[in-house]
Amino acid sequence: MQGVSSNLSLKELYEIDDHLWLEQTIKLLKANHLEELDLENLIEELDNLGRRDKAKVSLLEQILRHLLLLQFWTEEFQYKSGHWKAEIRNFRNQLKRNLTTNLYQFLEIELASIYYDALGYVIDKTEGKLDNLPQSCIYTLEQLLDINYLPENV
């Protein structure tokens, strides 16, 4: 294999320098040298990539939590709205940097479940004081990801 010391297999390279391993793996894939791939570690990396993407669900949940607090916790609005808006922007920026087509589709499918989790958090945080919280998600995924979207009454 070109670019890797003849004394190191791709599998050994993975243990020493995973970034170089990745570069070499990409070169092999592009050259269609599939027989030279380190399949065991490639499968592990792809599996980890999928899990890392799904971990981004927490960012969407954070956006939902802060939108609900911003829109419905009126007694705290004066004191906390700036913080909540900044947090919404922060989480949207993080999610935007990591958003792939597959992650977008996953978030679309899981939106109701993610909303339910965010709703539970807001109920606990406000100690059940808010009786006006919608029981199902009132935001579209596009609104949740839109850096400039805020509910009308905010």
Image (cartoon, grey):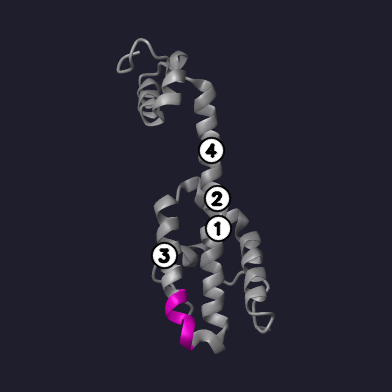
- Residue 40 vertical position relative to residue 99 in the rendered view, above or below: above
Instruction: Please report contact status of discs 3 and 2: CB closer than 8 Å, yes or no.
Output: no
Is 79 included in the stretch rendered in magenta?
yes
At a point 41% along the width and 56% down the height, the residue shown is 96
Amino acid carrying mark 2 in the image: Ala
Residue picked out by circle 1: 58
Instruction: Please report contact status of discs 1 and 2: CB closer than 8 Å, yes or no.
Output: yes
Amino acid carrying mark 3 in the image: Asn
Amino acid carrying mark 1 in the image: Ser
Magenta-drawn segment: 78-84
Q: Secondary structure at mark 4?
A: helix
Specify few, some or many for label 3: CA neighbours under 10 Å numbering under 14, 14-19, or 20 or more.
some
Kindly report the distance in space between the C-alpha atoms of the residues bearing marks 3 and 1.
Answer: 13 Å
Kindly report the distance in space between the C-alpha atoms of the residues bearing marks 4 and 2.
Answer: 10 Å
Main secondary structure found in the magenta portion: helix
The numbered mark, 3 or 2, whose residue comes first in the sequence reads 2
Residue picked out by circle 3: 90
Residue picked out by circle 4: 48
The numbered mark, 1 or 4, whose residue comes first in the sequence reads 4
Q: Nearer the viewer, residue 114 or 8?
A: 8
Instruction: Please report contact status of discs 3 and 1: CB closer than 8 Å, yes or no.
Output: no
Rendered location of residue 115, percent (x, y): 62, 65
Kindly report the distance in space between the C-alpha atoms of the residues bearing marks 3 and 2.
Answer: 16 Å
Q: Secondary structure at mark 2?
A: helix
Kindly report the distance in space between the C-alpha atoms of the residues bearing marks 1 and 2.
Answer: 6 Å
Q: Is residue 135 left or right of residue 37?
A: right
**In the figure, residue 58 lies in which quadrant?**
bottom right
Q: Nearer the viewer, residue 32 or 28?
A: 28
Rendered location of residue 29, percent (x, y): 40, 23
Q: Is residue 152 left or right of residue 115?
A: left
Q: Secondary structure at mark 3?
A: helix
Can residue 153 be seen here? The reply is no
